[in-house]
Image (cartoon, coloured by chain):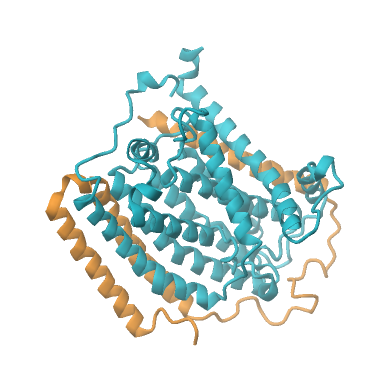
Chain colours: A cyan, B orange
Amino acid sequence: MDAWLSNPFVHGLVYGVVVVTALMTVTAWSIWFERKFAGRMQSRTGPTLVGPYGLLQPLADALKLLQKEDIVPKDADRVLFNVAPPLTVLFALGAAAVVPWGPEQIAADLDVGVLFILAMGGMVVFPVWIAGWASNNKYALLGGMRSVAQGISYEIPLVMAALVPVVLCGSMSVSDIVRFQLEHGWLIYSAPVVGFLAFLLFFLASLAEANRIPFDIPEAESELVAGVTTEYTGMKFGLFYLAEYLHTLVISAVASALFLGGWGGIGGLAPGLHWMVLKTLLLFGAIFWIRWTLLRFRADQLMTLCWKYLVPGGLALVMAAAAWVHWGAFAGTTATPAPAPAEQGAR
Amino acid sequence: MLETYLPMLFIFVIALTIGAVMFFGGQLIGPKNPTPEKMMPFECGNDSQGTAGVRLNVKFYLTAILFVVFDIEVVFIYPWAALFKSLGWTGFATMLAFIAALLIALAYCWKKGALEWES
């Protein structure tokens, strides 16, 4: 059985199917959760009719979207218009490949995992811009422009925030970073101020890149109809919607792996996988909480916040992390190298 | 070594398949009843005015250039970060100088007004 599982093709296929299925399922029911949560926050009940507690609502939503007419505007660029929605899902899911869900549950344990995550996150602006351009609609174009400006601006603080764990742990592999935290404590408190600020910066910049409130300028329904999704109907709109939630889920997982100790838990209460899932879902829930609590920034406030505060702040943070390593507690320590493949069973 | 990347390939293929299934599913099941009004660009119910190629603020272009400069510079820091612990004082001083140069560049852009979005 083990020999059969360690065949790279079988391993790849199994991990691919499991990771994608799990993420899609969680995403579908997170939409139910968000509606219920928002309802409770506003003294409503949220969905109640479809199934017990409205639990079948995501399925009903998907069925409804499937039955809607698929409209491509007359002057739109047909090919690009149709290519954009599946691409958003692809890039949103892509980064999940290198997230370590547990000590042995890593789909692809890359040496440059952090860089791969950032690259995938950066790619998300392409389909959004393609959609904005191909729609041949003023509002979609403006939404696409704003979305790209925001996405690439916040990419810089994001890259800087992700640099801090790399500096502190001396490795770009996500699983090495988690293993380092198991030894020295979660980065959010083991490098007191630096780790916490880096986590905040990473979280903020990720929110901005995933276009979540308070950074959802690209859709800004009060100004731009619906931004890039203005001309999309039925399941194509559904794909954009799905990709946004997938992206949010994946960045929660990445943030918990980089700063919150990944699969490390308190004592031996539960297997590592459970802790990782718990942390990811808590962060994911916190993003919903933020969404239903805060308002939206103005486009110019957003860019000012990024370039005038977060970029210089991020640079200072990187140097602070380097100084912490140079003089502080982690001096001379390096991340424990991954155990030899034979010890890890089916990898 | 290359087989490390296989799960990634499978995830890409599965993600694209899901996208394609949902996409073509919607096209198969949904009704097809195009009318000239439906095919027009959506502008809140009014007839479309002019072309979609509206003039855009030059700030977007500036932001793109700033992004190229700063993002590439920051990515240069990654190899240094991974090796930092074995570089000692030299590594620390070198990066201090590099980041100082980046901050000067940022200050220059700021002074020139490239970061102003209010006006």
Q: Position of residue A315 (x, y in %)?
A: 31, 64
Residue for point 54% across, 79% down: B56
Asked whether residue B65 appears in the rendered view, the answer is no
Q: Nearer the viewer, residue A29 or A95?
A: A29
Residue for point 64% across, 41% down: A26
Q: Is residue A109 above or below residue A220?
A: above
Q: Position of residue A77 (x, y in %)?
A: 64, 62
Residue for point 45% across, 20% down: A346
Q: Nearer the viewer, residue A273 or B118?
A: A273
Position of A284 with respect to B76 (left or right) is right
Asked whether residue A145 appears in the rendered view, the answer is yes
What is the total number of numbered labels drawn onto the structure image?
0
Residue for point 33% across, 84% down: B111
Q: Is residue A126 above or below residue A294?
A: above
Q: Nearer the viewer, residue A121 or A78?
A: A121
Q: Position of residue A279 (x, y in %)?
A: 53, 42
Position of A189 with respect to A248 (left or right) is left
Question: Furthest residue to the left?
Answer: B90
Q: Position of residue A190 (x, y in %)?
A: 34, 47
- Which quadrant is the C terminus of chain A positioned in? top left
Q: Is residue A147 above or below residue A275?
A: below
